[in-house]
Amino acid sequence: MYNGAATLDWSAPTTNADGSFLNDLAGYRVYQSLTSRAQSTEGLAMTDVGLARTLTVTNLAHNTRYFFSVTAYDINNNESTYSAEVSKLVIVSTLQLLRRFV
């Protein structure tokens, strides 16, 4: 089996939803699913990455589309709305397939 990976990165927010200065950011949560949030929020897997602004997700199955979004949370665990959603279709390269039969 040949698994893929997706590297995500994002910019830090500078203001709260009400426009006030953001001074109590505690971290980020990355959400992953096999379906778009536009279709369903069920089955979301969450990874808390603390204050890191990048995450590499590994062991993604071949020929499968994954959807990702990020939220920020503050020291009181108030969570922002989801970021714009991005997706990745994991495809095994021809070289990987050839190595399987050699």
Image: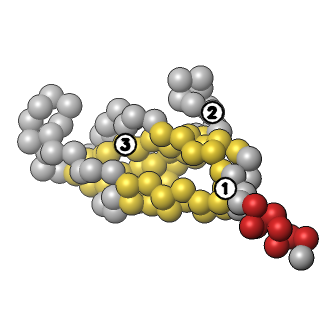
Local packing at callout 3 (Cα closer than 10 Å; few below 14, some 14-19, many 20+) is: some
For the residues labelled 1 and 2, the Cα–Cα distance comes to 14 Å
Q: Which residue is mark 3?
A: 71
Secondary structure beneath disc 1?
strand
Q: Position of residue 50 (x, y in %)?
A: 35, 60
Q: Which residue is mark 2?
A: 35
Q: Mark 3 or mark 2: which comes first in sequence? A: 2
Q: Decide: marks 1, 2 in contact (CB < 8 A)?
A: no
Near-viewer residue (82 or 48): 82
Q: Position of residue 68 (x, y in %)?
A: 50, 43
Rendered-image quadrant of the C terminus: bottom right
Residue in the image at 57% along x and 45% along y: 88
The answer to which image quadrant residue 100 occupies is bottom right
Secondary structure beneath disc 2?
loop
Q: Is residue 61 left or right of residue 10?
A: right
For the residues labelled 1 and 3, the Cα–Cα distance comes to 21 Å
On residue 60, which mark appears? 1
Q: Amino acid at mark 1?
A: Leu
